Image: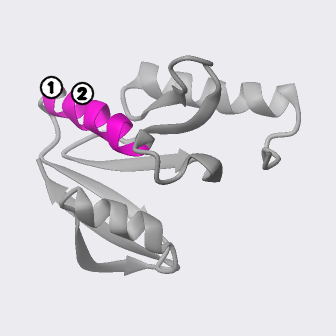
Amino acid sequence: MIPSPVCTRGASDKILDFWTKAQEDGWGFRWALSRRVSGEFVGTAGFNSLGLSSEYAYHLRPEYWHAGLMSEASTAAFAWLADTGFSTEIEAVIAPDNANSIAFAERWGFQRTDDASGEVIRYRQTI
């Protein structure tokens, strides 16, 4: 098992409080992803920002890559965002060496933009 970068209950609570406040304030939202049968936590998916252009972020434990879990989560997240009616595009910010994430974004119709900042490349999709 890969160790979590969050090593204490206090650090975990701080992250949960951050995303709870983001949801309450209406600018961000994350879902915990878990296995249906076991309930085991496997990652997160959601939006770092919500607005006309909403930034999608996703993280999945490596042992669950290529199992279709992020596709299922993305279907639900994009449907939720479309139902809100306030976004016209979705953006993903991806490190240029993250080939799996780039391939995932492209399968979902995201297109690379010329807007690169620092060590990341932006991908966008119109809703």
Q: The magenta stretch spans which residues?
A: 70-83
From this viewpoint, is residue 47 visible?
A: no
> In percent of the image, x 46 and y 53: which residue is there?
66
The Cα–Cα distance between marks 2 and 1, rounded to whole angstroms, is 5 Å
Near-viewer residue (66 or 10): 66
> In percent of the image, x 25 and y 41: which residue is there?
51
Category of crowding for the residue at label 1, using alpha-carbon neighbours closer than 10 angstroms: few (below 14), some (14–19), many (at least 20): few
Most common SS among magenta residues: helix
> CB under 8 Å between callouts 2 and 1?
yes
Taking the image as shown, residue 84 lies to the left or right of residue 71, namely left
Q: Secondary structure at mark 2?
A: helix
Q: Quadrant of residue 72?
A: top left
The reply to whether the magenta stretch includes residue 81 is: yes
Q: Secondary structure at mark 1?
A: helix
As shown in the figure, which amino acid type bears the numbered disc 1?
Answer: Asp
Q: How is the image coloured?
A: one colour
